[in-house]
Amino acid sequence: MASPLAAALLLSSQAALPPAPVAVVPRPVRLERGEGTFVLGPATRLRADASLRRTAELLQEELRRATGWPFPLLDGAARAVPASPEIRLRIDRSLASLGPEGYRLTSTPRGVEIAAPAAAGAFYGVQTLRQLLPPQLFRRAVTPGVRWEVPAVRVEDRPRFSWRGSHLDVARHFMPKRAVLDHIDLMALHKLNVFHWHLTDDQGWRLEIRKYPRLVEVGSRRRESQLGRDEEKGDGTPHGGFYTQDDVREVVRYAAERFVTVVPEIEMPGHAQAILAAYPDLGNTPAPVEVWTRWGISERVLSVDDRTIAFLTDVLAEVVDLFPSPFVHVGGDEVPPREWNESPAARARMRETGARDAEELHSWLMGRVGAFLASKGRRLVGWDEILDGGPAVPGAVVMSWRRAKSGLDAVRAGHDVVMAPMSHTYLDYYQSKEPGEPLAIGGFLPLETVYAFEPVPPELEGGDRASCVLGAQAQLWTEFMATPEAVQYMAWPRLAALAEVVWSPREARDLADFRARLAPHLARLDALGVSYRG
Ligand code: ACM
């Protein structure tokens, strides 16, 4: 038996401390604890292959800011200094079986190595490393007295789905560019990789288009907004904002450095009243409209005239120049048929195209737009109404929001789908029934329900069509979120639960385990200053 002194020494030594909790969100495929920890210090270096340099620089910036140490960055090919502690990022093609986004992270008391078959995987390895470090890493200045250690682990990880999305509506309430960049940072930390930017709607047009300056001059401002849920009342306060093309290029590039694809959404032919306020000629009736000041679905929709189609293709031509995403979202949801049914021009178009009703005419329009996008090498994405008027555009991706069944129908019709059902992914719904929640659109979607979401419908399970489910995403519609803080309150931590749904293996899903990891994870969001719902 050890003497009392030896026991006391043992207790105070590093080895006797309980291992620091390891709480990675989303949960990695495999994580094994090793012995001891790697302790960072003033001499710790970074080393990265040339193709991983930007990822290493992002890590370097954060480590410097948090620790005050220099973390010199060496080229991967440079000779290692024996016994010098290192965090190393490298490409290892022999890990190809992990897929383009997979990685292996190994930390020992001597250092950290992140190896991946491709750059995206190395980036995700770094996201895991950030979560293995103390949460003070996420503060914007040095926190004194922190022991910067990484527990010894071996992680092998890869995502379940390739589309791990977060949608943000900046039309109902404009979100400043700074908030968009912050949101992309948070997405990356949670290994989410598709930012669906809902840029246009009845209540505002947010994207500078060179050929049609009135879209932002007129379309980006509204006189007032609906006050609460009462359609009769306005708040009397003008609201507006838009992104210049330089803003967009900045956001796209910032996102790309974080392996996030920005998918723009340009709504058509409904949810388009802001366009009609700017260019009344594109509508079905000459009656003027203003940028809408109420929530809901405007009855005023775009016409299907040649000049409207020319306008749409002109706009999309600028959009594809700005956004390198292989996918362009054109909305297509909630198109009230009344104006087309009453318009002689729309009825003539129906006769000419053989469309029997407004739904089929909608399909025809989507076909025209989809063909234009295809000519630019892009795929059309649309909400699931694009299937209502018969076969949708070949190669279109269907975003299934109304029911899980619409996703299944789309897959059976030969489409790839992204699951975005209201039942599990609409983060504008209330997250609690407790009194005191901020006013929301309605519904009830607690964290557990998001966490329980299964993107692959049971009918597809195990079959070859399961791979047509590209993934899933959460929606943030902002009628009732006027500020970036309000968005964060609704997004987090539910978006962390969604991240686990789309990244982690289905069989690893365990709510109690997620909750246990969420507690230390929230300390990271605290350090970042995120106004999540605690
Ligand atoms: C939608 O919520 N209208 C896609």
Image: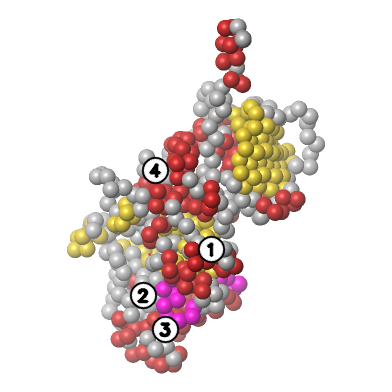
- Mark 2, residue position: 335
- Mark 4, residue position: 532
Vertical position of residue 462 compared to residue 409: above or below = above
Number of marks in picture? 4
C-alpha gap between disc 3 and disc 2: 12 Å
How crowded pointer 4 is (Cα within 10 Å; few <14, some 14-19, many 20+) is rated as some
Q: Residue 475: x and y, percent? A: 41, 58
Which comes sooner in the sequence, label 1 or label 3?
Answer: 3
Asked whether mark 3 lies closer than 8 Å to ligand 1, one says: no
Camera-near label (3 vs 2) is 3
- Mark 3, residue position: 360
User: Over which residues does the magenta segment extend?
Assistant: 376-392
Q: Residue at x 36, y 75 (%)?
A: 335
How crowded pointer 2 is (Cα within 10 Å; few <14, some 14-19, many 20+) is rated as many
Which comes sooner in the sequence, label 3 or label 4?
Answer: 3
Residue 84 among those drawn in magenta = no
Task: Return the residue nearer the eye: 396 or 412.
Answer: 412
Per the image, label 3 sits on a secondary structure element best described as helix
Left or right of residue 46, residue 516 in this image? left
Q: Is residue 480 visible?
A: no
Q: Are marks 4 and 1 in contact (CB under 8 Å)?
A: no
Q: Residue 252: x and y, percent? A: 55, 57
The label on residue 127 is none
Amino acid type, callout 3: Glu
* Residue farthest to the front, as pictured: 1
Camera-near label (4 vs 1) is 1
